[in-house]
């Protein structure tokens, strides 16, 4: 079985809402789809299959993917800020829950969070878990420029960790990097921002709560710098007023999960060697980039058959709220 935990579907209603805005994010119609203006210098074209459930299913069938956990692409509702962000998170979550219910056994859903008001965001997180039955939460590496250890963001993540729900940590345009070339933004700045977000959450003590955090794109640069991070964690004292961490940073990274969205055999194999099969979850980033390549590379990892099954489906079944989806598939 193959469960793709990193597969995007945009809300057409949200893109329609972004039309005519004089501030980012914004969107314009473009033939059969849209162009979303996400950040200075970063605009993304959207048309089927990211706008169509039927096209998504056709691509899944062609790739032999039984179940996809859907997440919203950029821009997410949190980029609107304030009450609008919370309102649209609720609406998109309702859309997502309706899609998963209409296609039992084919879809799970990563819920959206607005982070406009922390108490309202926590209430929406509980609704997504208790009423909508979504798999967990997509959280961006920054919330409209706010870091994840911001006082308006961290309590929400602590609540999610205490609920035992999973977080898929997805990159967003990093603040202060305006007008980067799109290839540099997507190819380099995105995974770096994800990596910094993980380290901020470690520093804020979130990892002491035992969260299920799945960092997109092989965990960014963290597997490559794991020993360096651990070394400096031993030799540099904490900032004044901050308590020392309970354990070195490298040990916290041992608790991180990653998805397999990468585009080279060596990085994927290195990640497997560093973290082990039980910390890796299959993803394609469909329909961005080359979604068939991550799947092909997973088949080439020098692991056992049982470990490959873990990566392709077992870890997702263990960590995400996919019981109803799996029952619908049976």
Image (cartoon, rainbow, N blue to C red):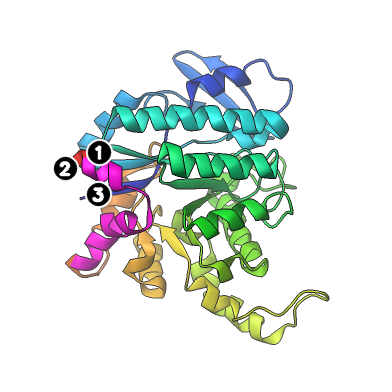
Q: Viewer-proximal residue, 148 or 283?
A: 148
Vertical comparison of 237 with 312: above or below = below
**Of callouts 1 and 3, which one flags the residue occurring earlier in the amino acid sequence?**
3
Numbered disc 2: secondary structure = loop
Q: Which residue carries the number 3 mark? A: 2
Q: Does residue 193 belong to the magenta stretch?
A: no
Q: Which residue carries the number 2 mark? A: 330
Marks 2 and 3, how far apart at CA? 14 Å
Can you give x and y, in whole percent of width and height, for residue 122 in the image?
A: 60, 45
**Of callouts 2 and 3, which one flags the residue occurring earlier in the amino acid sequence?**
3
**In the image, farthest residue toward the front:** 130
Can you give x and y, in whole percent of width and height, for residue 32 in the image?
A: 44, 14
Residues under numbered marks 2 and 1 in contact, where contact means CB atoms less than 8 Å apart? yes
Vertical comparison of 236 with 135: above or below = below
Q: Say which residue appears at 50% left-offset and 56% top-offset.
A: 163
Q: Which residue carries the number 1 mark? A: 105
Marks 2 and 1, how far apart at CA? 7 Å
């Amino acid at each position: 079985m193959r469960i793709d935990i990193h597969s995007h579907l945009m809300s057409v209603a949200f893109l329609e809402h972004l039309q005519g805005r004089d501030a980012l994010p914004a969107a314009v119609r473009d033939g059969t789809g849209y162009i979303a203006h996400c950040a200075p210098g970063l605009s993304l074209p959207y048309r089927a299959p990211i706008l169509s459930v039927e096209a998504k299913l056709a691509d899944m069938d062609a790739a032999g993917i039984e179940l996809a956990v859907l997440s919203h692409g950029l821009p997410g509702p949190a980029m609107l800020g304030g009450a609008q962000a919370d309102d649209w998170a609720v609406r998109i979550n309702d859309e997502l829950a309706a899609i998963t219910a209409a296609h039992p056994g084919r879809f799970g859903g990563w819920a959206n969070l607005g982070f406009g008001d922390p108490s309202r965001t926590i209430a929406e997180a509980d609704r997504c878990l208790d009423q909508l039955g979504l798999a967990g939460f997509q959280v961006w590496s920054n919330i409209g420029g706010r870091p994840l250890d911001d006082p308006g963001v961290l309590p929400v993540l602590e609540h999610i960790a205490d609920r035992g729900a999973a977080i898929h940590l997805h990159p967003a345009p990093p603040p202060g990097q305006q007008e980067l070339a799109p290839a540099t933004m997507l190819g380099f700045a995105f995974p770096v921002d994800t990596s910094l977000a993980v380290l901020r959450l470690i520093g804020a003590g979130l990892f002491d709560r035992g969260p299920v955090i799945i960092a997109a794109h092989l965990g960014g640069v963290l597997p490559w710098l794991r020993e360096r991070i651990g070394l400096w964690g031993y030799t540099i004292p904490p900032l004044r007023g901050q308590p020392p961490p309970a354990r070195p940073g490298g040990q916290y990274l041992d608790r991180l999960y990653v998805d397999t969205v990468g585009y080279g055999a060596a990085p994927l194999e290195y990640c497997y060697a560093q973290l082990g099969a039980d910390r890796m979850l299959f993803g394609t980033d469909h329909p961005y980039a080359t979604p068939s390549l991550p799947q092909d590379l997973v088949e080439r990892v020098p692991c056992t058959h049982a470990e490959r099954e873990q990566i392709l489906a077992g870890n997702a079944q263990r960590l995400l709220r996919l019981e109803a989806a799996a029952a619908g598939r049976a």
